[in-house]
Image (cartoon, rainbow, N blue to C red):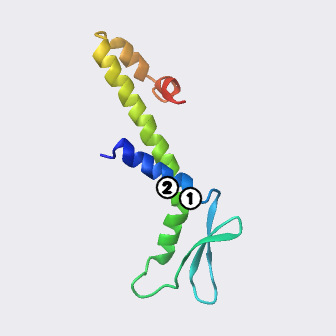
């Protein structure tokens, strides 16, 4: 399980990274891959070698991590908030019918109550 501290560290690293839409650019002279944000290189992967046959896939992963990681952090926080709501309700209420009603259409009802 990821602790709150670890989740905060992941979020801090994502927030510290260069903002913006990240893209890849393959240099035609040596096949190296640059990670580009707003026409500025933020990272460069060396030319492929026999040890790195997935270098293009690696670059695509890195580029998408810029937007995927914040989305994943937000989803973990949302799920934890739902779980905390359920835990609190189960500790304080005896009638579970209301909890069932909260979860009917959870994407609309409960999600709206929990999301900031």
**110, above or below 26, in the image:** above
Residue at the farthest bottom position:
29
Q: Position of residue 27 (x, y in %)?
A: 63, 83
Numbered label attached to residue 17: 1
Q: Secondary structure at mark 1?
A: loop
For mark 2, does the 10 Å Cα neighbourhood hold few (<14), some (14 to 19), or many (20 or more) residues? Answer: few
Residue visible at 55% across and 64% down in the picture: 63
Residue at the farthest top position:
95
Q: Are marks 2 and 1 in contact (CB under 8 Å)?
A: yes
**74, above or below 66, in the image:** above
Residue visible at 40% across and 29% down in the picture: 82
Front residue of this view, candidates 34 and 54: 34
Residue visible at 34% across and 44% down in the picture: 3
Q: Secondary structure at mark 2?
A: helix
Seen in the image, is 1 located left or right of residue 47?
left
For mark 1, does the 10 Å Cα neighbourhood hold few (<14), some (14 to 19), or many (20 or more) residues? Answer: few
Q: Which residue is mark 2?
A: 13
Numbered label attached to residue 38: none
Seen in the image, is 61 located left or right of residue 95?
right
Q: How many marks?
A: 2
- Distance between mark 2 and mark 1 Cα atoms: 6 Å
Indicate the quadrant containing the C terminus: top left, top right, bottom left or bottom right. Answer: top right
Front residue of this view, candidates 26 and 13: 13
Q: Position of residue 92 (x, y in %)?
A: 31, 13
Q: Position of residue 17 (x, y in %)?
A: 56, 59
Q: Position of residue 19 (x, y in %)?
A: 63, 56
**78, above or below 3, in the image:** above
Residue 18: name its quadrant. bottom right
Front residue of this view, candidates 112 and 107: 112
């Amino acid at each position: 399980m990821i602790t709150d501290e670890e989740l905060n560290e992941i979020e801090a690293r994502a927030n510290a990274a260069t903002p913006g839409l990240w893209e890849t650019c393959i240099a035609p002279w040596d096949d190296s891959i640059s990670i580009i944000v707003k026409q500025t290189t933020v990272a460069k992967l060396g030319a492929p070698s026999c040890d790195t046959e997935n270098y293009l896939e690696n670059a695509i992963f890195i580029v998408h991590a810029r937007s995927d990681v914040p989305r994943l952090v937000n989803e973990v926080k949302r799920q934890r908030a739902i779980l905390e709501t359920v835990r609190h309700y189960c500790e304080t209420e005896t009638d579970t019918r209301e909890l069932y009603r909260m979860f009917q259409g959870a994407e609309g009802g409960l999600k709206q109550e929990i999301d900031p």
